[in-house]
Image (spheres, rainbow, N blue to C red):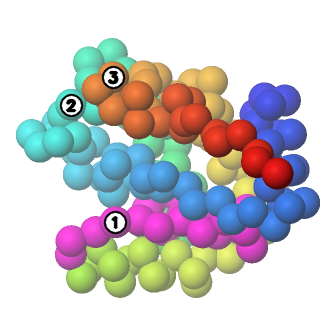
Amino acid sequence: MNLHHDIREKTYRELGIGIVPFSPLGRGFFGGKSVITPADNYLAAQPRIQGENFDKNKILYFRLEKLAEKHGCTISQLALAWLLHQGNNVVPTPGTTKIKNLDSNIGSFKVKLSKDDLREITDAIPPSEVAGDRMTEVFMPCSWKFANTPTKHS
């Protein structure tokens, strides 16, 4: 984590602002399908699932896979459980089109993690090791980085 992220997160919590993580399963990456066989759908266009980035990120995937086995759950359940343990103001909203995935996502509420477990998961996927941009360049102008906060009017 970096200082700006820590300050922003502290401010959100102090002000009671909710955090809705965007694409909490990495656009399906932590669902596993794109790791087993290269994506032949919209995932193929994602920078983190292309070329050298894909090879580097698969290492992170397999680290999380070992931890999921340890906790007796799927990788997606562990990822969602980690988010659910980040505080009451954090509400992941994974998208799915399949009932079996919805049921699996709901199962993440049953995954109980200790502070040591949370630290182990965080250490297994350090942000500095995630390769590639989080979205394609065409969508970057829609990102929070380019948002225009209106000025306060009296």
Query: Few, some or many C-alpha atoms within 10 Å of disc 2 (few <14, some 14-19, many ≥20)?
Result: few
The span shown in magenta is: 75-98
- Residue identifier under label 1: 95
Which sits in the foreground, 87 or 50?
Answer: 87
x, y percent for residue 110: 58, 83
**Dot 3 lies on which element?**
helix
Please report contact status of discs 1 and 3: CB closer than 8 Å, yes or no.
Answer: no
Q: In this view, does 107 lie to the left or right of 18?
A: left
**Dot 2 lies on which element?**
helix
Q: Residue at x 75, y 73 (%)?
A: 88
x, y percent for residue 149: 64, 40
Q: Please, what is the three-letter code of the amino acid marked with disc 3?
A: Glu
Compared with residue 105, is residue 90 higher up or lower down, i.e. above or below? Answer: above
Q: Residue 45 carries which label?
A: 2
As for residue 85 lying within the magenta part, the answer is yes
Q: Please, what is the three-letter code of the amino acid marked with disc 1?
A: Gly
In the image, farthest residue toward the left: 40
Q: Which residue is drawn at 80% across and 31% down?
A: 4
Viewport quadrant of the N terminus: top right
Query: Few, some or many C-alpha atoms within 10 Å of disc 3 (few <14, some 14-19, many ≥20)?
Result: few
Q: Residue at x 52, y 49 (%)?
A: 64
Question: What distance separates the C-alpha of mark 1 from that of mark 2?
Answer: 18 Å
- Residue identifier under label 3: 137
Disc on the earlier residue, 1 or 3: 1
